[in-house]
Image (cartoon, rainbow, N blue to C red):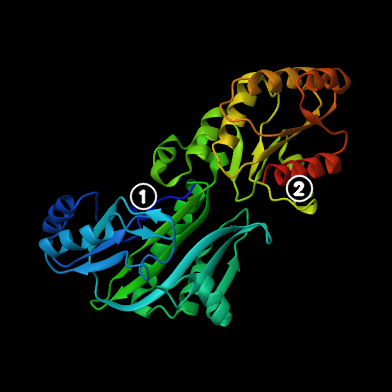
Amino acid sequence: MKLQEYRSKEILERHGVPLLAGTTATTPDEAREAARAIGGPVVVKAQVLVGGRGKAGGVKLAATPDEAAEKAREIIGLDIKGTTVKTVLIAPAADIAHEYYLGLILDRATKAITVIASAEGGVEIEETAKTNPEAILRLPLHPLIGLQEHETRRIGFFLGIPAELRKDFAKVMRGLYAAFVESDADLAEINPLVVTDDGQLLALDAKIVLDDSALPRHPDLEEMRDLNEEEPSEIAAREAGISFIKLDGSIGCMVNGAGLAMTTMDLVKLAGGEPANFLDIGGGAKQDKVTAAFKIILDDPNVKAILINIFGGITRGDEVARGIVEARSNLERDVPMVVRIVGTNSEEAKPILAEANLITADSLDDAAAKAVAAVRGAA
């Protein structure tokens, strides 16, 4: 789950990271009042969960409250990489002497929380990695003992933090690490971390991505979710307890089990098609869950066929087949459906599917081929 900048700053502030938090606004008038409360030059920043806001015109300086309102009017409603800006952050402006990048990621390659640091802040770290990889430090931390003081000093030396600010930098590094660990984050970054003209070390921008699987432990963080930036289908899937990711293809996939779902998507591509989603319906596959899955899949107008691939272990194939038939009768949209059910009571499922005139397949290769053919026939 990605957090907006102002939410990420709230978490960092809890852990003692020095920053300029600011106030959010959804109208020009609110932006004017926020700037008036700050009482000086401000920056007006679009709150969207994509990079490149500055280049797209989503970050603007304002010297007065009236100018802040005008800048907010220009930014609110702006389309940035397919996302419409609905909220802006009004924060005090800072006179910047130097910018740095500082981040933590959960690096599955090294199986460790890894520090990523660069003295080239203020730009996307991916761009720095392409153009000047030597400017980036990657430092895996011990998974049991975590961040150590000598590692903090090493990072500070690499960045070239002035000697008089190294204690302040240690506070920032410890705060960032604590925020990462205690929030169960996948990523936490400060970009830029700046030294101001008057010698302060401040986090001017922040980004935190949380592990969805850990959110039950953090109801306060779950409340920070910005539903305005999520696909309605993904919201519906979460409410139904279904693992779902929307893709760009035309073949909807309904599968029980994440590994089987990935295999199904691979074979759809191998057969010449494009999957429209990843969907793991989980165990049971009762009618209510099947109905919810169908509606989520068919919410995408690009879906021209659905491939249902169920392996029955504890799940009974005949119960799944009845659930599919009953759920299908309640759908507003009718598209070809290819069904493969193997495992427990799969033989009993076959006459149920045949009676409903559903396309069936015995192998996954056959099912993928039939789904691709159904899409081409509907084109």
Q: In x, y percent, where is residue 37?
A: 12, 55
Looking at this view, is 5 or 181 the one in front? 5
Q: Quarter-wise, where is residue 373 in the image?
A: top right
For label 1, the residue is 7
Q: In x, y percent, where is residue 287?
A: 65, 19
- Left or right side of 11 for 73: left
For label 2, the residue is 268
Relative to 107, residue 304 above or below: above
Q: In x, y percent, where is residue 256?
A: 72, 33
The kind of residue on which mark 2 rests is Val
Classify mark 2: residues with Cα within 10 Å, few (<14), some (14-19) or many (20+): many
> How far apart, in angstroms, are the residues tagged by discs 2 and 1?
39 Å
Counting labels gives: 2
Element carrying mark 1: helix
The answer to whether one can see residue 43 in this image is yes
Element carrying mark 2: helix
User: Which-is-in-front pick, marks 2 and 1?
Assistant: 2
Say which residue appears at 74% left-offset and 22% top-offset. Answer: 320
The label shown at residue 142 is none
Say which residue appears at 48% left-offset and 46% top-offset. Answer: 183
Classify mark 1: residues with Cα within 10 Å, few (<14), some (14-19) or many (20+): many
Looking at this view, is 129 or 94 the one in front? 129
The kind of residue on which mark 1 rests is Arg
- Left or right side of 309 for 216: left
- Left or right side of 293 for 155: left
CB atoms of marks 2 and 1 within 8 Å = no
Q: In x, y percent, where is residue 86?
A: 31, 50
Say which residue appears at 42% left-offset and 41% top-offset. Answer: 221
**Marks 2 and 1, the one that precedes in the sequence:** 1
The answer to whether one can see residue 20 in this image is no
Relative to 146, residue 303 above or below: above
